[in-house]
């Protein structure tokens, strides 16, 4: 199960809406082993595409080094789908390389409705998980 603060959900959704019609992407880092998303890190979709996303390799290297320096890991890896449901595509599954991460997908296909779903993706197997949105972790 993913437990995440409402403010982080709002920022992820706002990023997805702002980048629409292109897919948005980013991470939410947290202390290693905590399973607690804490630090929102929007990233650039190097593909600038409505159907595909890829982290810019230099930006990803910088962000992952920063997480290492701060004893963090990617707790949430997110991206948006602009015209399909919030479910991982074959490409999304093949690129999932962080077995401890929650893979969040946001669908922006409807202007007045947002689909926000989370998955674990390990060895090509996709498992949807419950999302609990809290006001704070306190």
Image (tube, grey):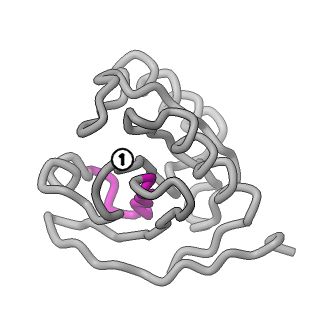
| 124 horizontally vs 55: left or right | left
Q: As rendered, which of 21 and 93 lies closer to the eye?
A: 21
Quadrant location of residue 17?
top right
- For this view, does 36 lie left or right of residue 44? right
Q: Which residues are magenta?
A: 97-108
Depth order, front residue of 46/75 = 46
Q: Residue at x 49, y 66 (%)?
A: 116
Q: Is residue 17 above or below residue 66?
A: below
Secondary structure at badge 1 equals loop
Residue 22's image quarter? top left
What percent of the width, then of the height, locates residue 117? 44, 70
- Rendered-image quadrant of the C terminus: bottom right
Which residue appears at 52% of the width and 29% of the height?
A: 63
Report the residue marked by disc 1.
Answer: 82
Q: To which quarter of the image does residue 128 belong?
A: bottom left
- Residue most extreme to the right: 138
Per the image, is 102 magenta? yes
Q: Residues within 10 Å of mark 1 (few under 14, many from 20)?
A: many
Write the residue at 34% across / 70% down: 120
- Spot the residue most to the top: 58
Name the residue located 24 percent from the left edge and 39 percent from the top edge.
51
Relative to 87, 61 lies left or right: right
Front residue of 23 and 2: 23
Q: Residue 33's spot in the image, x, y percent?
A: 56, 64
Please tell me whether residue 57 belongs to the stretch shown in magenta: no
């Amino acid at each position: 199960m993913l437990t995440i603060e409402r403010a982080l959900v709002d920022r992820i959704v706002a990023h997805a809406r702002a980048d629409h019609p292109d897919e948005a992407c980013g991470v939410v880092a947290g202390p290693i082993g905590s399973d607690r998303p804490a630090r929102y890190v929007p990233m650039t979709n190097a593909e600038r595409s409505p159907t595909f996303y890829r982290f810019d390799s230099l930006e990803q290297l910088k962000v992952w080094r920063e997480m290492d320096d701060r004893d963090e890991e990617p707790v949430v890896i997110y991206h948006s789908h602009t015209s399909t449901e919030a479910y991982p595509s074959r490409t999304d599954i093949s690129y999932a390389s962080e077995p401890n991460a929650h893979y969040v997908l946001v669908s922006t296909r409807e202007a007045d409705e947002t689909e926000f779903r989370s998955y674990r993706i390990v060895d090509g197997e996709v498992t949807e998980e419950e999302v609990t949105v809290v006001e704070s972790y306190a």
